Amino acid sequence: MILCDEIGTMIDAICAYFYTGYDVPRVLNEGGWFFLENILLIKSVVGRKPSLTDNKLRIKFLQTTKMTPLPNREPSSFFRFAAFSMIENKTINSSAVHDAYGIVVRVGNITRPDFVPQASENTILSHFLEFEIKNSWGKSLICVATGYTCELFVQLWRGLGLELGYHWNFGMNPTICVLRFWNVDDHEGRQCLISHNGASRITFNQSYPQINMDRVRTQFLQRMQTPELDEVVDEN
């Protein structure tokens, strides 16, 4: 899991399942605050389980670790938005997870494996769906939702009354997509954001203090009406 302190510093945390019977809650809700006691700091070792953050340390829970609930702090999602140009140009840390947001301009269909999986394999994990978002400056980014994130995307998307095979056109209400904890990786020869099963999150048209939704929509519509401005340097 990923933990974050009051100033936004993130770190990976490892908790063995059999420790949750001690002073560690079995179920943790995102956004909850806790005071941690008796934890072990270890170095992130290259070659072992990949880190979800760029922190060189990890927290390891012990049998004596205690988590005491605290009153919630000022609401903050601690986003770390990745610039589309840095993803495309491979100038970003691809070993950590990143956040992004933009207007959904294209949604493909679910791609399923063209092979017969073994009985022990979960076919959902091999499903993926490609979609494209644009930022306020008209810069595009290809994203790939895989596995359970793919299923969640379809569920939320259809909950908006929209269907797969979508292409945005003028006259359609722009839909803002916010991605949290996605990997940067190669997909069919392009640098994309790809979901990380178990960590990645996705929301549509959900308000956050760090994102001015009205301004995003307004700037996007202005940009699409004046495509000659697309030469402006990407600033998202």
Image (spheres, rainbow, N blue to C red):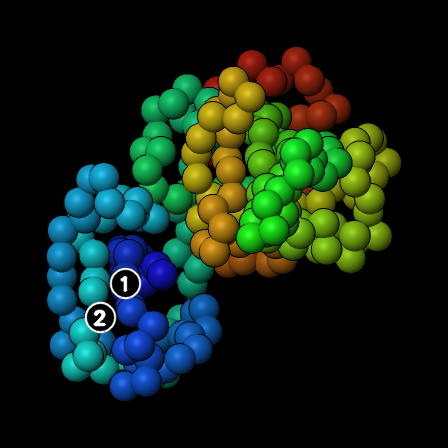
Q: Position of residue 8 (x, y in %)?
A: 31, 57
Lateral position of residue 148 relative to residue 61, left or right: right
* Residue under the point 65% across and 54% down: 152
Lateral position of residue 159 relative to residue 200, left or right: right
Callout 1: 10 Å neighbours few (<14), some, many (20+)? Answer: few
Q: Quadrant of residue 107?
A: top right
Please, what secondary structure does the residue beneath circle 1 have?
A: strand
Callout 2: 10 Å neighbours few (<14), some, many (20+)? Answer: many
Relative to residue 64, is residue 90 depicted above or below? above
Lateral position of residue 95 relative to residue 44, left or right: right
* Residue under the point 56% across and 49% down: 121
Residue type at mark 2: give it.
Answer: Phe
Q: Position of residue 85 (x, y in %)?
A: 46, 24
Between 224 and 185, the residue placed more toward the observer is: 185
Q: Position of residue 29 (x, y in %)?
A: 46, 73
Q: Which residue is mark 1?
A: 14
Q: Which residue is mark 2?
A: 61
Residue type at mark 1: give it.
Answer: Ile
| Residue 136 seen anywhere in this rendered image of the structure | no
Between 140 and 21, the residue placed more toward the observer is: 21
Please, what secondary structure does the residue beneath circle 2 have?
A: strand
Q: Quadrant of residue 16?
A: bottom left
Q: Position of residue 229 (x, y in %)?
A: 62, 17
Which image quadrant: the N terminus?
A: bottom left
* Residue under the point 43% across and 69% down: 31
For the residues bearing labels 2 and 1, Cβ distance under 8 angstroms: yes
Relative to residue 11, is residue 74 depicted above or below? below
Structural distance between the alpha carbons of marks 2 and 1: 6 Å
Between 125 and 139, the residue placed more toward the observer is: 125
